[in-house]
Amino acid sequence: MDVLLEGVRHAVGLLLGGDPEILEVLWLSLQVSGTATLVALLLGIPAGAALALSRFPGRTLLVSAVNTGMGLPPVVVGLFVTIFLWRSGPLGDWEVLYTPAAIVLAQAVIASPIVTGITLAAVQNVPAKFRLQLLALGASRAQMVWVTLREARLPMLAAVMAGFGGVISEIGASMMVGGNIKGQTRTLTTAMVLETGKGEFGIAIALSILLLTLVFGVNWALTTIQQRRA
Amino acid sequence: MRRLILTLLMLLLVLPPAARAQGAGSRTVILSTTTSTQDSGLLDVLVPMFERSTGYSLKTISVGTGQALALAARGEADVTLAHAPGLERTYVAEGRMQNRRLVMYNDILVIGPESDPAEIRGEQSVVAALKKIAGARARFVSRGDKSGTHSRELSLWKAAGITPAAPWYIESGQGMGATLGIANDRQGYTLTDRATMLAFVRRVDLEPMVEGDRLLLNIYSVMEVNPANGPRVNATGGTAFANFMLAPETQAVIKTFGVDKYGQPLFVPIAGKKDEDF
């Protein structure tokens, strides 16, 4: 128990003291996971909407694949992205392994199916009659898709929250493709594993509190928007 | 509110992910090394020194010794700092690593519960102690992760002529810190490096049982990666780091590292020595 108390004291000290190393780790986590979520939104929203609004052979198979992807184990993504980014791998020329860009890439792979899947569900929840009505009123197909997406925007905020929450708390991929390098690719979660390994449980607990606060803050902001418009 | 979120998102996109400072290609050196060098905090001191004195940017990948050497053999690293002499010599003999030089040592010890069920406290020979543990079927927690400490443990069992097995032999598959936690919880014996033991001294109430045996010396070497291992090996940078580890100023830092925190140094520098000296 004394470990927990020490951790909480430590967390308060680190936060109030503005420890530059911790702030750097916090900022990097926020940037990397924020960018990855953004990439996932750019890919996932069009993909999810297209899947929701079209019918073609093999669609069920594809939707099942997306739903499976929503639970993609980060460590599997990390392994494959690492192999691709190796100097000897197909993307070795990029020379981005062990950089923040590599973590963004891996996290975008993790978050994209989540965003796609939730968008798909949100758009399908908009009644089909509503879409027919839009078309009957003379909307073009593009206008119909746009209005439908707007109609589904509240449930889609959940996609942002799930995607961001998933990647910022993910550890397996960040560790493998980032390498937990001090001052370069050390994120909140990889720092936590390191400090635990070092026996610095106080710092590790402080970092957990920081991570939870951060995720809560982001979700709180998004929920506020979602509920205000509901 | 929505505008605020949008602005924040735009900011994230516009600001390039941090740490673009390191130059591309040949100014970056990748070091594959063991978790113990990082967990002890030694690299946190040495890496900035190296970067300042040479202008290289160093990326440290801390993994088990087995993986550190495997990565280097694939040309995914430029230089390796490891502590598994037997395995290292295999890699050097196969030509995948070259110019292996000794850097420093620390020691490994057998620790165990105060009750000492196998009665090994004070035993001089680690091999004899392991025989007693196996004879008493006393619980022993192994790293089981192909790390330097684990391969040392396996060679000691071999020397004792014993094939350890469940149920008294437990493999944690984790790092030294986590393994100490498990050994403590299960009140078993384990093999640990001194640095990690000192870091955990407040949380683990296992006691030193066997120490000082020559077989328990934990020797760290630096090896350069054969440029033929892969297309983008930075051989010059790798050599620069290897030379840095053996430079007198670096060796002086190693000699006193840990004194301020633990009251005793964690490593003994041995640049210029050979395997035969030990």
Image (tube, coloured by chain):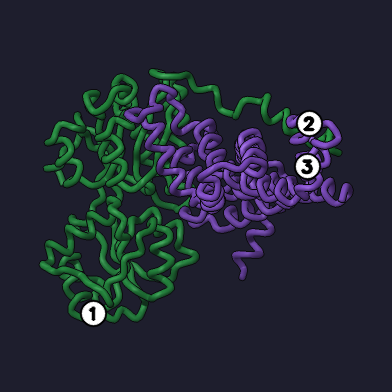
Name the one closer to the observer, B78 or A218: A218
Do the residues bearing badges 2 and 1 touch, measured as CB atoms within 8 Å?
no
Q: Quick one: SS at disc 3?
A: helix
Q: Which amino acid type is marked by label 2?
A: Gln
- In the picture, measured across the screen, residue B27 lies left or right of residue A220, that is left
| Distance CA(mark 3)–CA(mark 1) | 73 Å
Task: Name the tint of chain A in the rendering.
Answer: purple
3 and 2 marks on the same chain:
yes
Whole-Å distance between the Cαs marked 3 and 2? 10 Å
Say what secondary structure mark 1 lies in: loop
- Mark 2, secondary structure of its residue: helix
For label 1, the crowd category at 10 Å Cα-Cα, with few meaning under 14, some 14 to 19 and many 20 or more, is some
Q: Is residue A120 left or right of residue A59?
A: right
Determine which quarter of the picture holds residue B96.
top left
Q: From what the image shows, is residue B244 above or below residue B116?
A: above
- Mark 2, mark 1: which one is toward the viewer? 2
Q: Residues within 10 Å of mark 2 (few under 14, many from 20)?
A: few
Q: Which residue is mark 1?
A: B137
Out of A93 and B39, give the one closest to the viewer: A93
Identify the hue of chain B. Answer: green
Q: Which mark is residue A118?
A: none
Report the residue marked by disc 3. A131
Q: Residue at x 20, y 75 (%)?
A: B134
Badge 3: residue crowd in 10 Å (few <14, some 14–19, many ≥20): some
Q: Nearer the viewer, residue B249 or B163?
A: B163
Residue type at tag 3: Arg
> In the shown orientation, is residue A39 left or right of residue B192?
right
Residue A196 visible in the displayed image = yes
- Label 1 marks a residue whose chain is B
Q: Residue at x 62, y 54 (%)?
A: A208
Q: Please tell me which residue is depicted at 38% across the width and 26% down the height of the picture.
A: A92
Spot occupied by residue B65 in the image (x, y as percentages of width and height): 29, 46
